[in-house]
Amino acid sequence: MTESTNTPRSGYSREEAESFIKKFLSNNNYKVLAVKGKWGVGKTYLVHNFLSDNKKDYYYYASVFGISSIEQLKGRIVANFNQFNSNFVNKFLNNTVEWISRNASKLERTPKMDLGLPGQSSIPLVGSLISAAGDLALNILFNENARNSIICIDDLERKSTLPLNELLGFIEYLVQELNCKIILIYNEDILLEDEISKKILQYYREKVIDREFLLEPTVEENLNLIFNESPDIEVIKSVFLKAGTNNIRVIRKTKWLIDELIPLIENWQPSLRNQVINNSIVINLAKIDTNFRKNFSITIDRLLYLINSSKYKNNGTSEEIIQLVQQVSYLGYTPLEIDELIIKSLETSLSSSDELEFLQKGEILNQRENKNQVIKKLHNLGKPYYNSFGNDQKVIIEGIISFLEEYHLDLSISEFEQIEKIALLVELDISNYEKSFLEYKLKTLEPHYFNDLNALKVKLHKYPDLEAYLEEQRNQYRQNLDITTALRKLLNNESQLISPWLEAEIDFLDNCTVDEYSKWLEEGHPDLYLMVKQFLKLGLLASQKLEQAIRNLAKKSKLNKIRAKFLYNIDIENTSNTNDLN
């Protein structure tokens, strides 16, 4: 099992790094600082935040990602100047106006670009100024503004065709000629993969770089940075710490996903909510974190197979699937019916129909989880009695009352009876909860389920008002029955035996007269043939009445006689024991 969290750190924490940067900036002897670290650990974020808080008016930033010349780097630094000031603008204009006058003929009809500052009048410069004047304007703009400042140069490992020795030579120029302090930011592992860059860095390192450190924040540090205000921080940490992921970009994107799901799951059971967050993290890591996929061999395709093996192809051996199950279990992942929608949301936000489906499936999951929590707490209810002689009666009674206050309406009959047994042991009267429980069951069940309450008859006799209510509802149900409804209910019984809970339907059918069955047969029904065939086989008093009704109708016409004989094997020439059943 992967145990990334046990790997010793060789670098600095975020707090240590900030202290190091502070010492570097306050020491005039140090001019160049190298901040190293893997992609995504937060190097740029750390430096930017620290300088913004402490040196906001005096630092500039540029990435060398994709650039191929020092002039491009200068231009990028110019474009990222944090602020202009009026003294500098005046000086810049004084130094360039003479050159512009001398070259006015070359600049005619050249498109203008606007260098205007917020709240100030525009400074129109022609688009070809820099190219036509060589590097004069750029150098004036750069040298005057960069002097005595702090310049951050990022992404050294992502430079294009700019030679590293030329870049390091430019850095030495900034230090020696412009008295700048330089902070270099790069991933040394990637930079050293190139043999030429490796030799150049080794050769120039002592000459150019004064101080350096490796930023290696813990997973918890970066999680606190992104999720510091999240109420779910502990659940989130439990997954990331096991995964060993401290990539800030990955953590931030995970937060975006969780933030999108939170409004949909905010009222769910805490245990289910935690599981959704847990699964979301694993899914997101499998989608965007290369190191995670490499370390755990968990991909989106493999997760989809775990979610629905009948729908998605198994792309691994049985041993690999076993290992996958072990890995996801270690991370706390348990497949849920909504995981496919979470995966879908990684590529695009959930549509209205997707959210509705998410909520519908989630409601089923939440009801199931609510029931699981009730059962779990119910099982724990008797432990103080069975597991120790040290727990006194008061503790057990308080536990029972606390549980009933919260869950007594969510229990089944058998579950309530379990509590009754425990309550009896400690001489606790729970009749007030029992009556509330019975009343709730009586008033929330659908009318056709009232026969299921035969299991409660013994209990109901203690509460005459509830017993009367049940009888009233049963009578009302019987009055609203008809032959088709009662017969369908009886025939849809899954058991081969007639359920005792179908008492009302059986009583109703037995009490119907032969004439009522005759009328029902004449009215007809799309499923009449199948219902009659099945009903005749039940052997009830009502079955005999139905046969007599068929015989009576068969005597009325030749067609009915044929129907009776060939459809239901009833020959009116033969006598039956169904006479005088009215």
Image (cartoon, rainbow, N blue to C red):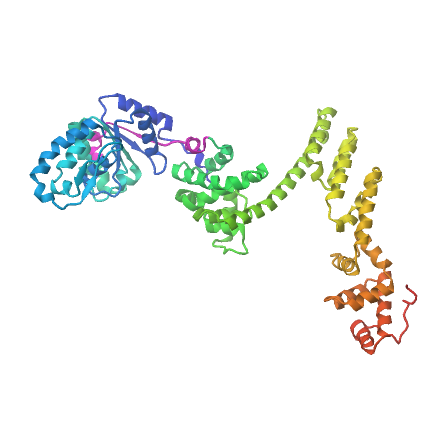
Q: Please state the total of marks drawn on the protein image.
A: 0
Q: Residue furthest front?
A: 121
Q: What stretch of residues is rendered in magenta?
A: 202-228
Give the quarter of the image for residue 197.
Answer: top left
Q: Nearer the viewer, residue 555 or 462?
A: 555
Q: Is residue 154 left or right of 175 when viewed as pictured? A: right
Q: Residue furthest left?
A: 102
Vertical comparison of 49 with 294: above or below: above
Q: Quadrant of the C terminus?
A: bottom right
Give the quarter of the image for residue 155.
Answer: top left
Vertical comparison of 540 with 41: above or below: below
Relative image position of residue 503 (x, y in whole percent) = 82, 53
Q: Nearer the viewer, residue 127 or 440?
A: 127
Q: Nearer the viewer, residue 159 or 560?
A: 560
Task: Write the residue at 90% across / 70% down.
Answer: 576
Vertical comparison of 522 with 365: above or below: below
Relative image position of residue 566 (x, y in whole percent) = 79, 75
Does the magenta run of residues contain 209?
yes
Relative image position of residue 359 (x, y in whole percent) = 56, 46
Relative image position of residue 57 (x, y in whole percent) = 27, 26
Q: Is residue 272 left or right of 386 when viewed as pictured? A: left
Residue 92 seen in the current view:
yes
Does the magenta run of residues contain 227?
yes
Q: Residue furthest right?
A: 580
Task: Write the residue at 34% across / 33% down.
Answer: 45
Residue 331 seen in the current view:
no
Q: Nearer the viewer, residue 496 or 230?
A: 230
